[in-house]
Image (spheres, rainbow, N blue to C red):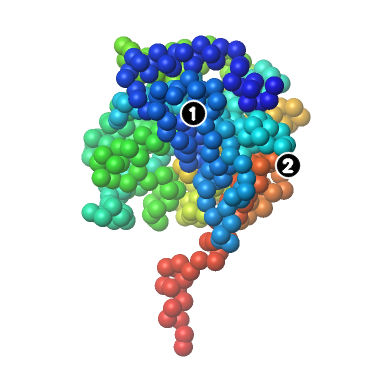
Amino acid sequence: MTDLEKHVNQPGRAKLVKDVRAKIKELGITYIYFQFISVTGRVVGKGIPADHWERTAEKGFQLVYGSTANLFLDRHNNYIGYGPEAMELVGIPDPETFVQLPWDKRVGRVFCTCFRNREERVNPGGHLTSDCRGNLRIFMDEFKKKHGLELRVGTEPEMMWLTRNEDGTPTGKGFSKPFCYHIDQFESLRPVFMKVIEYANAMGLDMIQGDHEDAPGQLELNWTYDNVLRNADRLSTYRQICAQVAREHNLIACFMTKPFMGVSASGCHTNMSLWKGGKIKVNKLGHKTLPGVEGVFSYVEGGTNTFMPDTKDMQMPGKIGLQSIAGIMKHLPALTALGSSTVNSYRRLWDQGFWAPVYADWGYQNRTCGLRVSAPGRFEYRSVDSMHNPYLLGAALLKACDEGISKKMKPAAPESRNIYEAQKAGKDVKKLPLSLGEALDRLAEDDVIKSAMPDEMYKVFHWYKNDEWERFLGATTQWDLDTYLDCLP
């Protein structure tokens, strides 16, 4: 069988397809968004009436291959990744991700896995390697089969709520004042974040905490950690929710890394740990009737956290944790291209003084390093911002951990000092890439991290991001005008 046929006929899927039909009837859903994730993390796909659920679940839908690259043109007016002569992908829905949209209960949403067209001459019905979500599932399963371990991830997505003019254009201002952790400023955005939490709860996100950060209109809302794929799905869902709430409140939900200079950027710290065992638990989140299938409301819990200290030193991670740190530290330069994936991302690293992770080092509770042990049993990868694609980054982190564990690598000693003080004392610490172009160069040299983007995935990513970098280099900005317009004679 082809990859597509194996996916459609996998054990238990037929029952899940029936479960979705039952939910469609129970909830009165008449329309469904069939969605997947592009190279930049954008949600793309098609809408299909719910009457066609069974047919679409079996046969899928077709969409141009270039949709995996947002169907964008490069600066030479060529479609990125795939030309107009390319066939169309087949999107197959994953019924375990089906859920109702709380802002229009007539509509449901389901994530999809993408495959090559059935009529392709080469590898017909094969997994579409430019499907970043499908890649992550494959690598997650391979990692678990090889090591018996599951990567669990919790993200901290900062973003800003910006005001807009009557015509919808941004005013250039955040809604609130830049006072970090001030309940008064948090309260000013209460109608917004309470609606976000309401919608998030209805779509399976177990919200656990939130606060006002230190940029204008900047909030961070967190949910319970889970395996790397489900957490990526929830981050994508969270972004959709924020976009909808912004429409309802005449605001802009801004995930751009640094829209303002002189204040903090929007990071998305990624906390990770590797576990053995554990059980799937359905968390009804206060619902008497779940507005979706159980898989959306399921979290993995329990098991053995292999990152926990295994010596008397309660700060030092366990053996597997240290090996994983060593693997990630080795590949930090290439990983930066995925965690800080836009030109604007590097404004965060250059505008120092706001705890931006500029240096390729690690330590305990040390926010001046790119990687820190934030608590016993987990560590925080800090060189990630809110524009990143969590499916690409998740796959790359698995590859880095795999090498560290497989080769029994050991990291250098942790840095407990402020990295700037350590440098003054003579420590030689390398900086992370400080531009998108440099990060892309480091990625091109790193076969391990590139293996997280197999075949067409790397081609699409490099084409898209290299074009973005070249467009920036060729653009005349306001800074150019302010600096050079009146400099002579």
Comparing labels 1 and 2, the label whose residue is closer to the camera: 1
Q: Quadrant of the N terminus?
A: top right
Horizontal side, residue 473 vs residue 171: left or right = right
State if disc 2 and disc 1 touch (CB < 8 Å). no
Image side of residue 296 versus residue 329, left or right: left
Is residue 302 visible in the rendered structure shown here?
A: no
Element at label 2: helix
Comparing 314 with 169, the one in front is: 169
Establish if 278 lies above or below 262: above
Sequence-wise first label, 1 or 2 = 1
In depth, the one of 184 and 67 nearer the eye is: 67
Q: Which residue is mark 2?
A: 447
How far apart are labels 1 and 2 at the CA level?
29 Å
Tell which residue pokes out farthest to the right in this image: 407
The residue under label 1 is which amino acid type?
Phe
Please give the name of the residue rendered at 76% of the width and 29% of the height, measured from the top-left corner.
Answer: 407
* Towards the viewer: 26 or 366: 26
The residue shown at (64%, 20%) is: 6
Figure check: 98 above or below 458: above
> How many numbered dots are placed on residues in this image?
2
Q: Amino acid at mark 2?
A: Asp
Viewer can see residue 56 = yes
Q: Position of residue 479 (x, y in %)?
A: 44, 68
**Residue 460: x, y in percent?**
62, 46
Residue indicated by mark 1:
111
Q: Secondary structure at mark 1?
A: strand
Residue 420 percent location from the top left of the image: 55, 49
